[in-house]
Image (spheres, rainbow, N blue to C red):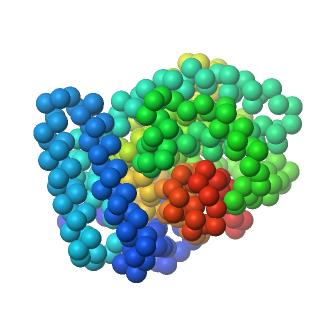
Amino acid sequence: MKYSMPAFCLLRDPKTYRPCPTDMLVDHEFRAHWLAHFRTHFELVVQLAIEVYGPHAATRARQCQDDFVGIIDQIERKPDLFGELNLLTFDVLRQHKLIQWELPDPFLHVKQRENQAMLALYPSIVAELDAHTQVRDALLLAVEGVFAGNIFDLGIMATAKRFSSGSVDFIKVRGEVAANRPWLVDHFDAFAEKLLVGKGYKKAVIFVDNAGSDCVLGILPLARLLAKRGTQVLLAANHLPALNDVTYTEMIALLTEVSNLDPVMQRLVRDGLIAPVNSGGIAPLIDLREVSDALNMATADADLVMLEGMGRALESNFDAQFKTDSVKFCMIKDAMIAQREGGKIYDSVFRFDVL
Ligand code: MG
């Protein structure tokens, strides 16, 4: 018998919850856009796989590409091949094919490269946050840092191209994010009010997105700020590699690395005020109908759910309702997603829903 994973314990109504509301069996424009994307983008996946697994893996990587693109072609001819068709269908299919061809983590090297490059900047980013006398200003800067960091996304062609010749200038992008307020969805002031003036939160779970600047310069400094003010922060990361998302194992290693650079982080991690948790996730989007037992055990008493990144917070789960207050925040990096939200590429979204 197959073990079935439980639904996320903080979903308000698991029966009516749907991770990806856009049904590609109905929405032909959306389907055509993503069929083209997954077909084209896999070329980058193959190149990176050969970098990670070596020249002897080149034949296998091309066979994997033929296999995956063959299924994309089949879906094009018969969209209901798997019964339903949404973004998670494509994401899970891609991961399964990579695992089947023993190329489970093509983005391993690029994640490591970006993590190391961003760790060098981490001390100056947290020092800058600590220098603010007004905590609200620090919180805003930390959130802007999450948006700027979230640009490290090799799942989308527009941002993958920006990283092909090295890291993107985090400070410059953060400045652009700050100049863009109000953001496309901008509930930051209400969130800051509840967090800083209201009763705040005792335990938050953040579903994190990418490695590199996203995690090191965005999420970790934000988690540190929340934890310093007494909110316990759980960092829920994927079980398996998916694109350049940070995995649970990588998150544990990163927390050790930043703790070595930062006595404050060291104390927060030691005291359990910041802790990693394995979400059970296997894709760049997250289906909250299937999470790990560890996540449910750790979050049963959480009073804030934060979903970060376009995949987890917008392409899936944007309308998900929880038993707690929730934040969905990301930078938009795909033109069609932007257009459908009434915005443009590189717009930021900060949605805050009070229970
Ligand atoms: Mg991602």
Q: Is residue 152 above or below residue 269?
A: below
Q: Split into 4 quadrants, where in the image is the C terminus? A: bottom right
Residue 163 pos. (x, y %): 47, 35
Q: Is residue 63 above or below residue 52?
A: below
331 sits to left or right of 195: left
Q: Split into 4 quadrants, where in the image is the N terminus? A: bottom left
Residue 26 pos. (x, y %): 40, 81
Asked whether 343 or 229 is in front, the reply is 343
Q: Residue at x 75, y 31 (%)?
A: 129
Q: Residue at x 25, y 54 (%)?
A: 96
Asked whether 288 or 211 is in front, the reply is 211
Residue 194 pos. (x, y %): 80, 55
> So how many labels did they put on this image?
0
Q: Residue at x 55, y 42 (%)?
A: 151
Can residue 6 be seen in the rendering of this structure? Answer: no
Q: Is residue 7 above or below residue 125?
A: below
Residue 145 pos. (x, y %): 66, 39
Asked whether 219 or 106 is in front, the reply is 106
Q: Residue at x 69, y 49 (%)?
A: 202
Farthest residue, direction bottom:
26
Can residue 98 be seen in the rendering of this structure? Answer: yes
Asked whether 16 or 154 is in front, the reply is 154
The picture quadrant where one finds residue 55 is: top left
Q: Is residue 116 above or below residue 11?
A: above
